[in-house]
Amino acid sequence: MNERWILFSCSVPAANAKARMRIWRRISACGAVQLKTGLQILPNRDDLLESITWLIGEVTALGGEAIAIQCSRIEGMEDEQIEKLFQGQIDQEFLQIQAEARELLSAASLSVNNDQAKEVLPALRKLRKRCESLQGRDFFPSGAAVKTFALLDTASEKLRRTETAPRQLVSFDRAGYQGRIWVTRVRPYIDRLSSAWLIGRFIDAKAQFRFLEPGEKAIPAKGEIPFDIAGAEFSHQGELITFEVMARGFDLLDPAIMKISELVRCIDIQEGTILPDDAALLKNLLDGLIAISTSDHQLLDRALLIFDALYAGYSQKK
């Protein structure tokens, strides 16, 4: 029979308060959940069983008593109920990290200079390490870890952008950007794919695209133009994503493009944990294309059709 759970119970002499607290911390560090007073439960895994075995030896050495039992089920409780106990316990810690991240981001946004942002970034890195550590005890993931990492990524990206003062937006003449090679990073996602669509459909009809591997750079002598790359003319500026910079710079502000811009920004920034329906659908489509595409160029070709369809649909609504 499949023994799914480990039940653990121990008692340490009351006179040794420090030892009692140390044992409690050890069992908590394993990720155990309390079923009843003095009775803890863990998933039955080799690493957890080994930890409990060492803990039993430590309790015994302190003059206490400890026992561990492997079992397939707990009478009076369904496995799903027990899993929810684990989720409820670990998810509270993920929510605490989310709250701390939002507080750090709020403090940075109220700062009148970039010094606060520079101080917050190391704090966010510490929160990420805490989140990574919690994953070892996230035995039955509910999605809280994914949301927490997404929030930390968004916060770090926002603060990274504030380290450089936004440049004044300028207008560009399309005549100077014809028949060029546009380069961006490998594994493009929403902002790069949508910006490539904007380039090919409205800026440079003969545009070619090249994807740069890590450490590789654009070659201006060959007419290459970088986009959505740090420091590039066509990249994030202040709070604007690359798609918005290009749309404004080339005066591509018709309602259909502006609607697409809203979706792109929503997915790229992803400030909330729940996307609007249109944005969620677009993200699911792109995620699916990534899963079935064998190269960045194939992905781009397929994504262009998605944005073509969106543009046609929104233009009809207009």
Image (spheres, grey):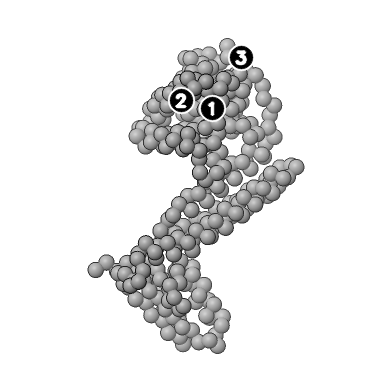
Q: Which amino acid is tagged 1?
A: Lys
Residue 40 makes an appearance in the image: yes
Q: Which amino acid is tagged 3?
A: Asp
Q: Which mark is residue 259?
A: 1
Q: Residues within 10 Å of mark 3 (few under 14, many from 20)?
A: few
| Disc nearer the start of the sequence (3/2) | 3
Q: Are the residues tagged 3 and 2 within 8 Å (C-beta)? A: no
**Is 57 positioned to the left or the right of 104 in the image?**
left
Instruction: Please provide percent x and percent y for residue 154.
Output: 56, 43
Q: Which mark is residue 310?
A: 2
**Is 86 positioned to the left or the right of 19 in the image?**
left
- Examine the rendered structure and indicate whether residue 305 appears above or below residue 113: above
Disc 1 secondary structure class: helix
**In the image, what residue occupies the spot 53% across and 81% down?**
19
Q: Which amino acid is tagged 2?
A: Leu
Q: Residue furthest right?
A: 112
Disc 2 secondary structure class: helix
Q: Are the residues tagged 3 and 1 within 8 Å (C-beta)? A: no
**Is 32 positioned to the left or the right of 95 in the image?**
left
Distance of label 2 from label 1 (alpha carbons) = 9 Å
| Disc nearer the start of the sequence (2/1) | 1
Q: Are the residues tagged 2 and 1 within 8 Å (C-beta)? A: yes
Q: Which mark is residue 173?
A: 3
**In the image, what residue occupies the spot 64% across and 47% down?**
105
Q: Name the mark nearer the viewer: 3 or 1.
A: 1
Q: Name the mark nearer the viewer: 3 or 2.
A: 2
- Examine the rendered structure and indicate whether residue 223 appears above or below residue 111: above
Q: Residue furthest top?
A: 175
| Disc nearer the start of the sequence (3/1) | 3
